[in-house]
Amino acid sequence: MPVPFHRHELEPADAAAVADVLATPFLTSGRVGAAVEEQIAEFLGLPHVLLTNSWTNGAIATLLALGIGPGDEVIVPAMTFIATANVVRLVGATPVFVDVDPDTLMMMADGLEAAITARTRAAIPVHLYGQMAPMRALAAVAARHGIRLIEDAAHCFEGARDGARPGALSDAAIFSFYATKNVTCGEGGAIATRDTDLAARIRQTRLHGMSAGAADRFRGGRYRHWDMTRLGTKANLPDLLAALLPAQIARVEERRQKREALARRYREALAGFAPDLVLPAWVEGAKHAHHLFPVHVAPHMRDTLLARLTESGIGATVNYRAVPQTRYWRDFLGEERAEHDFPVATRWGEGTFSLPLYPSLGEAEQDEVIETLARILQEHLPEGA
């Protein structure tokens, strides 16, 4: 039985919400988006949320609002999606890569502290695969050195750790509502912050630096002129896409629990293949969003396993490899640094791939994935392994 890597969970009610927006004269950022921002703020327990048209543009708007640019350094983990580093470069700053914890694959406090220099303005820890980074420890380091902390929470809308949710311990947390995310509108994102002044600046930097967007110019029955007060980008989310979000947010915990049950089932079924097949550690007591289910095998086996899984109709894929191993960043860092400075991220990236994980994945489908992977592993592992 074929099992796709991803299947979205949108329902007829979500399509109806989009149709409702189409019936209005206002398709871009307006009342629907404003209501979703309030819904997310209540969900996270934070005062300010700003919708964006992608994680990437949300991060650029945030960096611009913080005044980060040429001459500044921003610390990022070597294991993440390329966007985490790209946004730093796009505002003219320099990303400084750090290796990651060998168990969780995330930025650690000692790695952050060791990388801070006189030019460091911020760090962007990543909540990888749906699990939160150690934000209390990272926030303590950031406070001690007076640097900004921006959470890459693209994978972790519904996660928590050490009593804190994304945005509770940082200057801002940035989310993604991309097509494969746990909450999706195809392309989109959000920025959450406790900082009222920062939120006001981001409202401008997400819309070309303008003091008032289209919906704001006609509030109260009178026209309001706009001005450009700072440099910004185009990061606002239209109501047409925002309409897909409210019902999903209301269902997010129910769906997270389904993901968690499936993830536990994978872990139990695949435990017998250790140490040939390795899974990232789960942090005890944390609420995992279970965005992805990654596994790791010896790098020389990975592509063979992927090919065999694909031939068998199983949708497995490589989500991330170490960012310094991509061609652009190898050229930026130099071959010597790219090859040797990030051994944990490099090895994980060379051997990792992800298995299907979504709430509508049936047990029979998951059994097909498990049995197919087990059969292929048994064929390719050395005898007696």
Image (cartoon, rainbow, N blue to C red):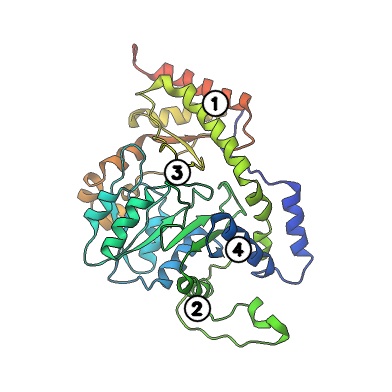
Q: Considering the image in quadrants, where does the C terminus appear?
A: top left
> Could you say where residue 263 lies in the image, as x and y percent from the top left?
52, 32
Select label 1 or label 3 by which is in front: 3
Question: For the residues marked 4 and 3, what is the alpha-carbon distance in whole angstroms?
Answer: 23 Å
- In the picture of the structure, the residue carrying the numbered disc 3 is 131
Question: For the residues marked 2 and 1, what is the alpha-carbon distance in whole angstroms?
Answer: 48 Å
Residue drawn at x 58%, y 85% as measured from the top left: 226
Mark 2 lies on a secondary structure that is loop
Mark 1 surroundings: few (<14), some (14-19) or many (≥20) residues within 10 A: many
Asked if labels 2 and 4 touch by Cβ distance under 8 angstroms, the answer is no
- In the picture of the structure, the residue carrying the numbered disc 1 is 369
> Could you say where residue 123 lies in the image, as x and y percent from the top left?
34, 59
- In the picture of the structure, the residue carrying the numbered disc 4 is 37
Q: Is residue 377 above or below residue 154?
A: above
Can see residue 190? Answer: yes
Select label 3 or label 2 by which is in front: 3
Q: Earlier in the sequence, mark 1 or mark 4?
A: 4
Q: Considering the image in quadrants, where does the N terminus appear?
A: top right
- In the picture of the structure, the residue carrying the numbered disc 2 is 209
> Could you say where residue 15 lies in the image, as x and y percent from the top left?
74, 53
Residue drawn at x 34%, y 71% as measured from the top left: 69
Q: Earlier in the sequence, mark 2 or mark 1?
A: 2
Asked if labels 3 and 1 touch by Cβ distance under 8 angstroms, the answer is no
Mark 1 lies on a secondary structure that is helix
Question: For the residues marked 4 and 2, what is the alpha-carbon distance in whole angstroms?
Answer: 20 Å
Q: Amino acid at mark 3?
A: Gln
Mark 3 lies on a secondary structure that is loop
Q: Earlier in the sequence, mark 3 or mark 2?
A: 3
> Could you say where residue 370 lies in the image, as x and y percent from the top left?
52, 23
Mark 4 surroundings: few (<14), some (14-19) or many (≥20) residues within 10 A: many
